[in-house]
Amino acid sequence: MKVRELLDRPERWTQGVLARDTTTGNPVGPESEFATAWCLGGAVMRAYPAYEDQTEPLRRLREAIFGPPRGKGYPEPRIGNWNDAPGRTFEEVRELVERLDI
């Protein structure tokens, strides 16, 4: 499974939590059987359940969003901050995952 398969329509994307049960509106874990919407980071966790498989998609997302790594001593930028930014749209998220083919 790929992130773009999970985030295939606006109602399957969320902000402020990793995942949500859209029938109740409650936050749930991204791997939960009740998860029906994911933020970008939560979708990576769901699509690539093994931690070691998440490394490359997360690296590609960070570079596409924030540019190349700045090196030691700098905090790693958070994909969640980008996903949750005021005014962020599903279309922006969708375009990114399509372009990166993740």
Image: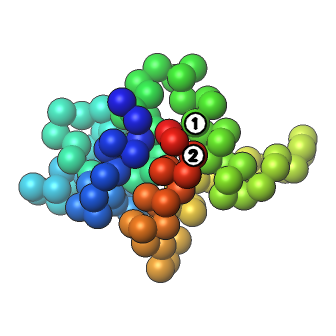
Report whether 17 appears left or right of 69. Answer: left
Report whether 60 appears left or right of 36. Answer: right
The residue at 27%/58% (across/down) is: 9
Q: Where is residue 78 shown, x and y percent of the image?
A: 62, 53
The residue at 48%/46% (across/down) is: 41
What's the residue type where badge 2 is placed?
Leu
Residue 41 visible in image: yes
What's the residue type where badge 1 is placed?
Pro
Measured Cα–Cα span from mark 1 to mark 2: 9 Å
Residue 18 visible in image: no
Secondary structure category for the residue under label 2: helix
What is the total number of numbered labels drawn onto the structure image? 2
Q: Where is residue 72 shown, x and y percent of the image?
A: 90, 41
Q: Where is residue 56 shown, x and y percent of the image?
A: 63, 31
The residue at 42%/68% (across/down) is: 91
Q: Residue furthest bottom?
A: 87
Q: Where is residue 8 shown, x and y percent of the image?
A: 31, 52
The image quadrant that residue 89 belongs to is bottom left
Q: Which residue is mark 1?
A: 57
Q: Which residue is mark 2?
A: 100
Q: Residue furthest left?
A: 23
